[in-house]
Image (spheres, rainbow, N blue to C red):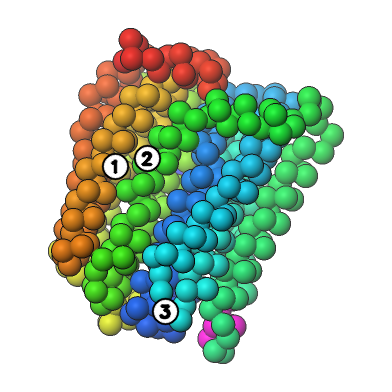
Amino acid sequence: MRSVLLRLAGFTGAPILSALAPFLLLPIISRVTGPGGWADFSAGQSIGILGMVVVFFGWGVVGPVRVARTTDAPGRAQILRESLVSRAITTVVAIPLVIVATALVTGGEFKLESIAMAVAMTLAGLSPSWFCIGAARPIDLMLYDAGPKLLAALAAMPVLLLGGPVLFYPIVLAVVTVAAAAVHAVRNLRGASGPRVGLGRGFRVLRELLPTAAIDAAGNAYGATPVPIATAGLPPAQASSFASADRLYRVGVLAVIALGNAFQAWVLEPDATSPVRRHRAAILAHLGLGVFGAVGLAVLGPWASGFIFGADVAADPLTCVLFGVAFFAISSATPFIRNILIPHGRYRFVLATTLTASVIGVTIMTIGSFNGHEAVVAAGVAAAELTSLLILLVPGLRLIGTPAPHPVTVQTAEVEGSPSSW
């Protein structure tokens, strides 16, 4: 139990630092940019998250599982090589796309800053966080993921407080993100033997990861598009209010990720003597976090957003309630996806569920945006997450007592994810 608590503390601390880093700056940025610019800057962040998903191309989902199930150093080094080459390819594709998308959605005097933020967020897909999670190394997660984000925020804070350009922050964030990824790669590959991974192998890896990447992309379609959709259709005041609620929600989701990171390697340990008990512990923990976060967003969201980002862009109370519903659903669904369905290779089922939820959510969000109803956009977020939870719940519970294949690879996932095995 002590080791579990230590792991939980380590994997929770890194995302807390990741959450703290932007919170040091976002209150300053929201006041410098004003209501209109705040919505544009938030839209750039959200589009950058989609770009980051493109760069990851499924590594954030299947990578921790592969690393956790590969105990030898050469095997883990080979996984890292494959990820570096394949993500270099996706980075070249993703950056032009996010530049164009951000330029189309945003406007006004902070367009360049919004584009720069989108690029910086996209480069976060080069982070080795997934590798650190799978290897159960919370210290590395601090050093190579959370630490650089905090360093960028601390470096930019005095510049912004002294009236410096907002552009300084995304530039520094991009530089430290790439540098941290490079240092991690050098440290983990030095002296490690293994076959060379060229572009040909990189493209084959991407082809193998396509089912996983599709799940990740579909999930983030309704996870990262609310602010761009709201910015495109709502009046600036409503769009900025929505962006504030969304920022609080996204920081809350970091707690869900932290909890998932803490439990994933523990639950999936090949030598676990009581896997069912571990699954139940993870599910109960996520349910508790979901209830706590939902109540917190609903009750404290309007006040907290006004205090942090400014009264002019405070979140609407009904919007906060709906984001609270979404938070409960996403927290509750996380252990079923990460610890049960994905390790069992149910990629196509999760993909179908995610696509269904995405279509429902984006449709409702778009209708709300172009009819000028902020709460309806938030209802789309809640509807998507609830749909996903309800569909995944029954098959997830049914598989708790069934051992996952060992080792888990993309190839076995594709075979076991066929419709006949659902």
Q: Position of residue 376 (x, y in %)?
A: 16, 58
Quadrant hosting residue 359: top left
Task: First in sequence, mark 3 or 2: give its number.
Answer: 3
Horizontally, residue 299 falls left or right of residue 123, namely left
Instruction: From this view, report whether residue 270 is shown above or below residue 288.
Output: above
Residue 289 seen in the current view? no
Q: Main secondary structure of the magenta part?
A: helix
The numbered disc on residue 108 is 3
Residue assigned mark 2: 218
Q: CA distance from mark 3 to mark 2?
A: 30 Å
Task: First in sequence, mark 3 or 1: give its number.
Answer: 3
Task: First in sequence, mark 2 or 1: give its number.
Answer: 2
Residue 422 seen in the current view? yes
Instruction: From this view, report whether residue 86 is shown above or below residue 322.
Output: above
Q: Position of residue 190 (x, y in %)?
A: 82, 38
The numbered disc on residue 358 is 1
Q: CA distance from mark 3 to mark 1?
A: 30 Å
Q: Amino acid at mark 3?
A: Gly
Q: Amino acid at mark 1?
A: Ser
Instruction: From this view, report whether residue 357 is shown above or below residue 255.
Output: above
The numbered disc on residue 319 is none
Q: Is residue 244 magenta?
A: no
